[in-house]
Image (tube, rainbow, N blue to C red):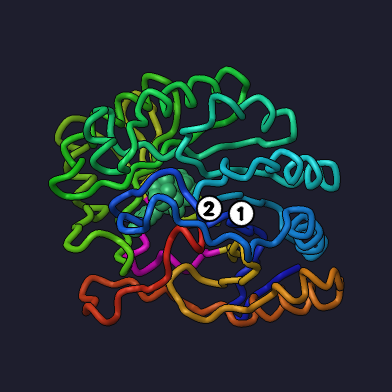
């Protein structure tokens, strides 16, 4: 079992399989050139699978594949099926912008993918273009429908930003509810790669907007997960991920590995372990040592807070760590 120095059991790993993306979201990588290609340093997915199997042997029970945009890796189904065959009890999930999902949903499901979280920041085609620099709404909606059709469990993720999409907080909630899909609002996390001047809505502001239309109550803090769960009177359940809150890190159960093999024990903390040489050497002992070192290095708390000064804002890119 992987237990950190603060007594937290680490049983969840997020795996970024690429830094590349077909979107340029304002809160993530707006200024990266569209032809950005820096993935020669990729860990081959077959080697990443070996590392993940060792992580499973050490106690990992859930794997989320992310990026950049993970569906840009054409051999993704092979990675999923290799892990699924090795440990069918391990939950494999994916986070995607869904642009390519219609094409891949069935093969991903057949490979063993159980869940998918899909980013949906607007239901207005022009606004999606403004947010992501891609004319993508139609493809995203088709991807959601296809994922539902093939039986993937779905959650939608929305990052509400002031003056950009905060007027759609209710609309997206109602859309998710109409499709019987759980919605999670994610507080915007400040980082130096995002567009200057973005202001995200905090949990209390999001709740105020929802409450004006729908009475609701908090039901629980998601067990060993980052979201607080709320329920409307008609029993529709949604979540809010609020890393700025004080208690956010207490039940953190996760570590991250980048597509280049760097293990990050916390999304907003510069410490990391370079596991690339260990993974490429295929040495079980070296990979296990790197994993244990990263868990031992896991900090107690992230560094997001309300009064962050410009020079304290995280320089870690979400498209690198996988969000
Ligand atoms: N490309 C995929 C997607 O967008 O779903 C997966 C990678 S993306 C980095 C993973 C998640 O991080 C998405 O839900 C996205 O909305 C979220 N994200 C990215 N930048 C963020 C930021 N600055 N603050 C909060 N969430 C962010
Ligand atoms: Fe791409 Fe996801 Fe970042 Fe948007 S949030 S630019 S879709 S990696």
x and y, in percent, of residue 37 in the image: 51, 57
Lateral position of residue 237 relative to residue 96, left or right: left
x and y, in percent, of residue 212 in the image: 14, 35
x and y, in percent, of residue 295 in the image: 64, 75
Q: What element carries label 2?
A: loop
Lateral position of residue 285 relative to residue 90, left or right: right
**In percent of the image, x 77 and y 69: which residue is there?**
279
Q: Magenta region's main secondary structure?
A: loop
Toward the viewer: 263 or 305? Answer: 263
**In percent of the image, x 37 and y 23: which residue is there?**
138
Lateral position of residue 236 relative to residue 274, left or right: left
The answer to whether mark 2 and mark 1 are in CB contact below 8 A is yes
Q: Is residue 259 magenta?
A: no
Q: Which of marks 2 and 1 is nearer the N terminus?
A: 1
**In percent of the image, x 51 and y 79: which residue is there?**
299
Q: In which quarter of the image is residue 185?
A: top left
Question: Mark 2 packing: few (<14 Cα in 10 Å), some, or many (20+)?
Answer: many
Toward the viewer: 217 or 277? Answer: 277
Which residue carries the number 2 mark?
A: 67
Which segment did they paint magenta? 241-252
x and y, in percent, of residue 261 in the image: 65, 68
Toward the viewer: 260 or 49? Answer: 260
Relative height, residue 196 to residue 103 (above, below): below
Q: Is mark 1 on a helix, strand or loop?
A: loop
Which residue carries the number 1 mark?
A: 17
């Amino acid at each position: 079992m992987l237990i950190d120095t603060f007594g937290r059991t680490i049983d969840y790993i997020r795996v970024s399989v690429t830094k590349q993306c077909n979107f340029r979201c304002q809160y993530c990588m707006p200024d990266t050139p569209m032809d950005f290609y820096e993935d020669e340093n990729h860990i081959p997915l077959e080697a990443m699978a070996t590392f993940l199997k060792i992580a499973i042997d050490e106690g990992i029970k859930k794997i989320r594949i992310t990026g950049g945009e993970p569906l840009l890796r054409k051999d993704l189904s092979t990675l999923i099926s290799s892990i699924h065959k090795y440990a069918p009890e391990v939950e494999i999930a994916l986070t995607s912008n869904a642009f390519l999902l219609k094409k891949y949903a069935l093969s991903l499901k057949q490979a063993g993918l159980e869940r998918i979280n899909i980013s949906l920041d607007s239901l207005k085609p022009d606004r999606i273009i403004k947010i992501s620099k891609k004319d993508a709404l139609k493809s995203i909606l088709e991807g959601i429908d296809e994922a539902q059709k093939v039986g993937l469990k779905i959650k939608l993720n929305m990052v509400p930003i002031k003056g950009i999409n905060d007027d759609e907080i209710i609309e997206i909630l109602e859309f998710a509810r109409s499709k019987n899909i759980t919605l999670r609002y994610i507080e915007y996390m400040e980082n130096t790669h995002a567009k200057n001047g973005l202001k995200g809505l905090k949990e209390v502001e999001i709740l105020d907007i929802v409450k004006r239309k729908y009475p609701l109550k908090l039901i629980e803090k998601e067990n060993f997960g980052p979201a607080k769960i709320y329920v409307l009177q008609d029993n529709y359940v949604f979540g809010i991920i609020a890393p700025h809150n004080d208690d956010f890190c207490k039940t953190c159960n996760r570590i991250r590995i980048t597509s280049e093999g760097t293990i990050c024990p916390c999304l907003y903390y510069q410490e990391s372990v370079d596991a690339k040489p260990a993974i490429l050497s295929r040495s079980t002992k070296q990979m296990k040592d790197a994993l244990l070192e990263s868990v031992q290095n896991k900090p107690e708390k992230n560094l997001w807070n309300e009064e962050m000064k410009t020079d304290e804002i995280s320089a870690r890119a979400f498209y690198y760590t996988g969000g």
